[in-house]
Image (cartoon, helix red, strand yellow):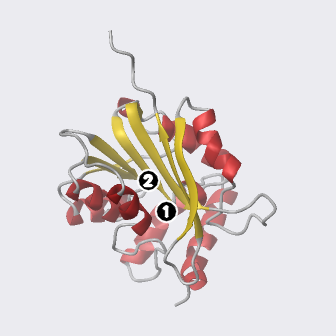
Amino acid sequence: MTTDAKRARARALAAEAIAAGEPEAWFERLYQEAEAGEAIVPWDDRRANPLLVAWLDRHAAPRLGARALDVGCGTGDNAGELASRGWAVTAFDVAPTAVAVASVRFPEVTCEVASALDPPPAWREAFDLVVEIYTLQVLPPAERARAAQALAGLVAPGGTLLVIARAREVDDPPGAMPWPLVEAEIRAIGETSGLVCAELGAVLDDETPPVRRWVAAFTRPARAEG
């Protein structure tokens, strides 16, 4: 099955949910259909995202007790990768079916049902690393901006927000869901949240054909001592 064929059902469900004013409602339905063997979740590869793995390989192991948050965790592979590297991981998804699967597959991870648009207040500035991979790109523009700001607010002083998303140039067509982001949208995450852009680059992934992706890291300045 081609990538476009895999995405066809997801796109149809997304269009229905957005038209109904419920841009997150389709995720649970897609995971339910996938569990019943009636659909495929196009991003559920049952492996950690290679771009996340490469980014983690380039950075030092976490300090003891460091907390990581996996956004839109799906069935948990990225959360499991983070846990295997020593992070104390909380993972969340808006789809209860996905969270249930992730909880069974990775019991070492704290898995919760939550929304990127309205995360729990207790998570405010609570995580040393917040990992967002392919979640912003499946939200319409208004919700995308809202989620980006909400997620930025979860980064602890001295912590990092990692964003990996499809990329496009300003003159490129917007495309279909998942919608590629332009560089200005990525940079705006830091500019409007008080985070500092520490890394931003475009790379090709390992899909066939390869897809251009942004890999961006934003940091929250550490609080001054004393």
Nearest the viewer among 47 and 119 is 47
Left or right: 49 in relation to 68:
right
Q: Could you tell me residue 136's position as x and y percent?
A: 56, 53
Element on which disc 2 rests: loop
Q: Position of residue 97 (x, y in %)?
A: 36, 63
Q: In the rendering, which numbered label is found on residue 27?
A: 1
Q: Position of residue 33 (x, y in %)?
A: 44, 75
Residues under numbered marks 2 and 1 in contact, where contact means CB atoms less than 8 Å apart: yes
Residue extending farthest to the bottom is: 1
Report which quarter residue 78 is drawn in: bottom left
Residue that numbered label 2 is attached to: 94
Q: Residues within 10 Å of mark 1 (few under 14, many from 20)?
A: many
Kind of residue at badge 2: Val
Amino acid under disc 1: Phe
- The number of discs equals 2
172 relative to 70, above or below: below
Within the image, what quadrant is residue 50 found in?
bottom left
Q: In the picture shown, does residue 153 fall above or below 186?
A: above
